[in-house]
Structure formats: structure tokens, C-alpha cells
Amino acid sequence: MDSNNYLKDIKDIKNMMSQSSQFISLSGLSGVLAGIYAILGAIYVNGLLLNHYETYVTLESDTFKKIVITALVVLTASLLTAYVMTVRKAKKLEESVWNPSSRRLLINFLIPLVTGGIFALLLLRHGHYGLVAPITLLFYGLACLNASKYTLRDVRYLGITEIILGLLAVEFSGFGLYFWAIGFGLCHIIYGGMMHFKYDRK
């Protein structure tokens, strides 16, 4: 009997240590919704490209401006959804949204992400449009991988998947939008759904 109690105490201590070092309030459902936003955005952008009759999409074109606006709308909607649903889950778990674990998570996530964003802007500036989708996938994957030490393990596998898709998008450069839709859309829906059923419904 005492042995069972000791084992239970050890398990409880391990769980407490894990929770103190990891931010576990990420909402899987917000990932699903972000994936849906991304797919809708990709469908809209694909329509823009089909109706763009010039050979290339230049920075000065209306098509490019609409693509940028679409990307910003998708990003804003995804961030707002993630914030609202994470706050709600944190309250449910009685966990503070802004704590040492979430700060470490955010810092480790933003360093590769911001680097990739700047790199993508430089590529656009120099006319390397075909590499933007692969680069965003690669650096987003690296950001997830880097931040996964401080949150749910599933984020690590999402990051690895995004990196693989980014590399494939480099090889098949003419299909960047489709890889982007798979990476930011379908993968978010799949991994977000898995996280929702594994963690959110407890």
C-alpha cells in the first residue's frame, strides 16, 4: 500500500515539474480554425493568380497587394483566435497565460519566425518570389521545433512536418501555394484536431 502511495507521489511530482516548465494551455481548436483560415486564404489567392494575366506578379501589381492583404487578414484572424482560445483554456486549467513558461515559449518561437519573416521580405525585395512560400514554411517549422521544448510535444512534430514541406516546396517551386496551403492549412487542422482530442477535452 505504501509502495503504491510513493509511486503516486512520484508521478504527481513529475506532473507538477512538467507543468511548471511547459505551457500547456495552447488550444488545439485554435489550430484547426487557423488551418481553415489559411485554406480559405489560399483558395482566394489561387483565384487571384488565375485571373492575373501578366507573366509575373510584381510588387507594384494590384494582385500582389491583394495577396499581402489576404495574408495579413489570415494572420490576424489566426492570432486573435489563438489568443482568445488560449486564454479561455488557461482559465479552465487555472493557469496564468503570461508566466515564465509562456515567455520562454514565445521568445523561442519568435526568434526563428521573425528571422524568417525578414528573410522572406528580403527575397521579395530582390524578386525571388518563388522562394517565399518555402521559406515561410521552413522558418515556421523551425519556430515550432524551437518552441516545442516549452509546450505540448505535438508542436514538435508539427514543426518537423512544416520543415519537410518547406524543403519539398523548394524542390517543386511552381507549387508553392499548394504546399503553403497544406502546411499552414491542412497540417494545422490535423495537428490541432489531434491536440484538441488529446488535451482540450479532458
Image (cartoon, helix red, strand yellow):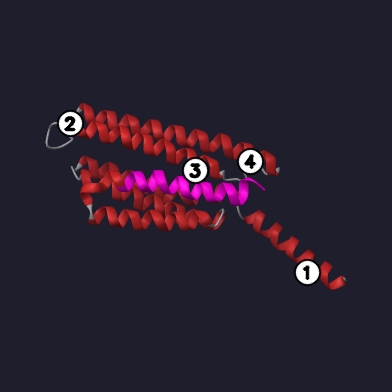
- Tags 3 and 1 touching, CB below 8 Å: no
What residue does disc 4 label? 89
Q: CA distance from mark 3 to mark 1?
A: 35 Å
How far separated are the C-alphas under marks 4 and 1?
Answer: 29 Å
> SS of the residue at dot 4?
helix
Q: Position of residue 81 (x, y in %)?
A: 51, 34
| Residue 151, above or below 65 | below
**Could you classify mark 3 by the number of other residues whose Cα lies within 10 Å: few (under 14), some (14-19), or many (20 or more)?**
many
Q: Looking at the image, which residue is at 33% across and 45% down?
A: 180
Q: Secondary structure at mark 1?
A: helix
Q: Amino acid at mark 4?
A: Lys
State yes or no: discs 4 and 3 in contact (Cβ < 8 Å): no
Quadrant of res 13: bottom right
Q: Residue 56, percent across and down?
A: 14, 37
Q: Please tell me which of labels 4 and 1 falls first in the chain.
A: 1
Residue type, label 1: Leu
What residue sits right under mark 2 in the picture? 52
User: Within the image, what quadrant is residue 60 found in?
Assistant: top left
Q: Earlier in the sequence, mark 4 or mark 3?
A: 3
Q: Which mark is residue 7?
A: 1
Other-residue count near label 1 (Cα within 10 Å), few / some / many at <14 / 14–19 / ≥20: few
CB within 8 Å, label 4 to label 2: no
Magenta residues, start to end: 179-202
Helix, strand or loop at disc 3? helix
Q: Residue at x 57, y 43 (%)?
A: 27
Q: Is residue 175 above or below residue 82?
A: below
Q: Residue at x 35, y 58 (%)?
A: 164
Q: Are marks 4 and 1 in contact (CB under 8 Å)?
A: no
Left or right side of 77 for 57: left
Q: Quadrant of the N terminus?
A: bottom right
- CA distance for labels 2 and 1: 65 Å
